[in-house]
Image: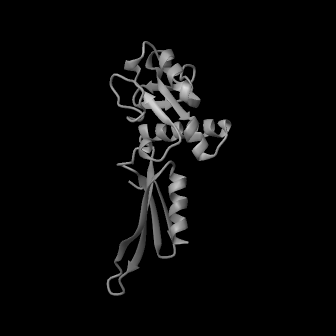
Amino acid sequence: MSLDTLEIDDITIEVTPDLDPMNPRDWDNLGKMVCWHKRYNLGDSNTGYSLNDYNSAEELFDAIKKDSLVVLPLYLYDHSGISMSVGSFVGRAPHAEWDSGMVGYIYATKEAIKAEGVDIATAEEILRKEVEIYDKYLQGDFYGYTAYKNTKCDCCGHTSKEVIDSCWGYGSVEEAMNAGKDTVA
């Protein structure tokens, strides 16, 4: 299902949903996500933290805070799909009083921030962006493009399409289309 199509000379670029996106938590991220939920496997599996090892979420927060410069809460909204945010959904989404709650933390350790060479404000901004990208993943909101070379048969007039490039994992239709245009420019 093409969401956007562009013709440039004998090239066609089509943007479609990414039906098998890569989990952005498998990317090289500044932050680590420690999450808990009875029905969903969320966040990172290699954090070294688990809510089961503590008496409360506050106790877990205190433990994470000892080694981290930035710790942000994670909230999940579960209503006809799931969405994650660093802010509560109450007042922002229908039925959020019942269908949302805190599910974890995203944090950046002192060592990771130093290795990245960023200040605390920039690290917090990066963590917020990581959550936005993960939210897009959870909602199935990733896209890709395929670029085709169109060749018209001189005899019968049939046009065939040959794939010349494709790439996936973009967070918007516009981003995927711009990447497709860049490859054929």
Report the residue at 43% width, 60% height from top: 167
Indicate whether 161 appears above or below 153: above
Quarter of the image containing the C terminus? Answer: bottom right
Q: Nearer the viewer, residue 60 or 44?
A: 60
* x, y percent for residue 126: 59, 41
Furthest residue in direction top, as rendered: 55
* x, y percent for residue 69: 60, 31
Report the residue at 52% width, 38% height from top: 31
Residue 54 seen in this snapshot = yes
Indicate whether 111 appears above or below 184: above
**Residue 158 lies in quadrant:** bottom left
* x, y percent for residue 108: 55, 35
Residue 95 seen in this snapshot = no
What colour scheme has been applied to the protein in the rendered image?
one colour
Indicate whether 132 appears above or below 97: below
Report the residue at 54% width, 54% height from top: 175
* x, y percent for residue 85: 52, 30
Tell whether 99 sits left or right of 123: left
**Residue 80 lies in quadrant:** top left
Q: Nearer the viewer, residue 143 or 84?
A: 84
